[in-house]
Amino acid sequence: MSAAVVVMGIGIALVLAVLGATLLLAVFRIVRGPTILDRMIGSDVVLTTVLMVIATAMVVQRDLAAVPVLVVIAATSVFATIAVARAVTPSSDPSDDGADVTTPERRQEEQS
């Protein structure tokens, strides 16, 4: 086994370890919350981490067959973020600068 193969193996192991740690921290953020925006950030990080794992596998295998999967996951992440952003914005007025933006959780607290 050549030195290049060993270095590549160590590099791949380090990348996967960092991605695994990122995934665990993102899942912790999703579980802990406390707001929907925290959970959305966590889910974005999870989807981005999944993208990076698939991209790493593509580099190792030297195969581009998973590119459509990457595009679908990225589009899902973007559309989910837009949907949540629209859901937590209280006004549909385009001139609203968002100064009084609140989350559904705070809206329920204010109504109680």
Image: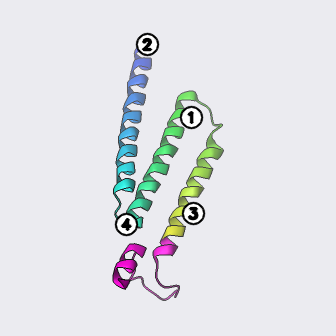
Q: Which residue in the structure is indicated by mark 3?
A: 79
Is label 1 in a helix, a strand or a loop?
helix
Disc 2 from disc 1: Cα separation: 22 Å
* Residue occupied by mark 2: 2
Between marks 3 and 4, how big is the CA–CA gap?
19 Å
The picture quadrant where one finds residue 6 is: top left
**Residue marked by disc 1:** 58
- Amino acid under disc 4: Thr
Q: Estimate the x, y position of residue 103 in percent, counting from the top left.
A: 40, 74
User: For the residues carrying marks 3 and 1, which lies nearer the camera in this image?
Assistant: 3
- Residue at image position (50%, 68%) is 84
Q: Position of residue 48 (x, y in %)?
A: 48, 49
Which image quadrant: the C terminus?
bottom left
Q: Nearer the viewer, mark 2 or mark 1?
A: 1
Which element is circle 3 on?
helix
First in sequence: mark 2 vs mark 1: 2
Between the residue at mark 3 and the residue at mark 1, the CA separation in whole angstroms equals 25 Å
